Image (tube, grey):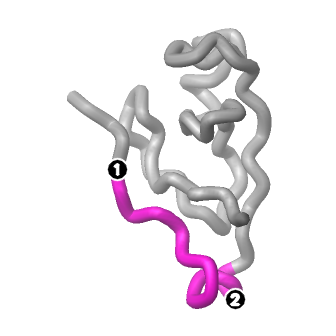
């Protein structure tokens, strides 16, 4: 089972492409940019879990395992 690879920071809305570094996730895949993760002291505000570096997904795998297009940022 592949990670969902959410496309944005759910705190500020910054784009977080699946093939690029700089995203942080908790065990439930809540996703945040590096700046927001730092502001949150690497703790997920939703579940209280640790935020860790999300691995990247090479573009060559996007057809077989597409990243999510569902944005989670809410203004």
From this view, report whether residue 42 is shown above or below residue 73. Answer: above
**Which quarter of the figure has residue 2?**
bottom right
Q: Earlier in the sequence, mark 2 or mark 1?
A: 2
Residue with the mark numbered 1: 71
**Left or right: 66 with respect to 25?**
left
Label 2 crowd (10 A; few <14 / some 14-19 / many >=20): few
Quadrant location, the C terminus: top left
Q: Is residue 73 magenta?
A: no
Q: Give the dominant element type of the magenta stretch: helix, strand or loop.
A: loop
Residue 45: x and y in percent read 53, 13
Residue 23: x and y in percent read 64, 44
Q: Residue at x 61, y 40 (%)?
A: 29
Tell me which segment is drawn in magenta.
Answer: 59-70
Q: Residue at x 47, y 39 (%)?
A: 9
Q: Residue at x 57, y 57 (%)?
A: 4
Q: Residue 37 got which mark?
A: none
Residue with the mark numbered 2: 60
| Mark 2, secondary structure of its residue | helix
Label 1 crowd (10 A; few <14 / some 14-19 / many >=20): few
| Mark 1, secondary structure of its residue | loop
**Which quarter of the figure has residue 14?**
top left
From this view, report whether residue 49 is shown above or below residue 69. Answer: above
Residue sitting nearer the eye, 50 or 39: 50
Quadrant location, the N terminus: bottom right
- Gap in Å between the C-alphas at discs 2 and 1? 22 Å
Question: What residue occupies the far front of the structure in this picture?
Answer: 1
Residue sitting nearer the eye, 46 or 7: 46
């Amino acid at each position: 089972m592949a990670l969902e690879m959410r496309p944005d920071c759910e705190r500020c809305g910054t784009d977080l492409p699946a093939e690029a570094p700089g995203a942080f996730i908790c065990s439930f895949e809540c996703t945040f940019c590096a700046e927001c993760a730092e502001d949150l002291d690497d703790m997920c505000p939703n579940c209280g879990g640790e935020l860790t570096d999300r691995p990247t997904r090479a573009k060559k795998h996007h057809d077989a395992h597409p990243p999510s297009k569902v944005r989670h940022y809410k203004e």
